[in-house]
Amino acid sequence: MRISEGHIHEVVLDASGKAAVRVTCPQRAIPSPGRYTLAWSPDDTDASLAAPLFPAEISEHGFLAGSPVPHSWEPGTALVLNGPLGHGFSIPKTIRHLLLIALGESFSRLIPFIRLSLDRNAAVALFTDCALPLLPTAVEVYPLLDLPGALSWADFIGIDLPIDALDSLRPYLGLQPGSELPCQAQVLIYSHMPCGGTAECCACAVPGKRKTKLSCKDGPVFDLQDLKW
């Protein structure tokens, strides 16, 4: 267990009007794309569970954690940080065409993945129906309705979805049962992860092909081929 101290530097609103927080912390506590850090405030006596924070932006002195975040947090709030935890995105060095899909209410967890891919000169296409923040002009954005026609373009697919949307992924992709994707795909499955893999409470259980997996420990990023979907 890696424990660090941090604090809320700023509370901002994302493109959908929901709160996000800028966390100042040591570099060792900053999660890489797809990983998370569990955070709680020692001053918030009403909070019984830690909040998983995913990076939407990463800087030298901390990171921007996208929604959802506790409503009680405000600038100056002290935090105890446990992490980074879990497995993040593993980006091939040879990637040329990255297709990103966000099926939830936010795609903030994919933004660091976007910037890392652009740094590798990959073309990036994002499919989402979410409200859009300011993105690099190199990113092409499309509605989810157009997704099936883009699968053959990609050589790597990154997906962000809430745990209860896994069953709806195949219809969004326009694939029949048993059909496979034309390239490697990794999926970040977002869910409540109160224990960070320490207690195996199974609140974030994900159906795997061979056995049930836990998003907090085995994920939250999985190879899609390893899951039942």
Image (spheres, rainbow, N blue to C red):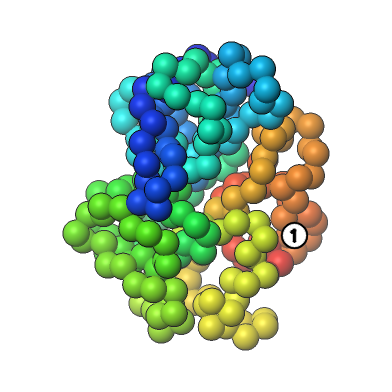
Quadrant holding the C terminus = bottom right
Residue shown at the point (66%, 25%) measured from the top left:
47
Residue 14: give x, y in percent of width and height: 37, 46
Residue where numbered disc 1 is placed: 207
Judge by depth and name the residue closer to the eye, 106 or 83.
106
Residue shown at the point (62%, 85%) measured from the top left:
176
**In the shown orientation, is residue 114 left or right of residue 40?**
left
Residue 143: give x, y in percent of width and height: 39, 73
Residue shown at the point (72%, 55%) measured from the top left:
206
Judge by depth and name the residue closer to the eye, 96 or 10.
10
Residue 128: give x, y in percent of width and height: 42, 66
**In the shown orientation, is residue 140 left or right of residue 88?**
left
Whether residue 163 is visible here, answered yes or no, is: yes
Residue 16: give x, y in percent of width and height: 40, 53
Location of residue 167 with respect to 59 vertically, above or below:
below
Q: Secondary structure at mark 1?
A: loop
Q: How many marks?
A: 1
Quadrant holding the N terminus = top right
Residue shown at the point (31%, 53%) measured from the top left:
133
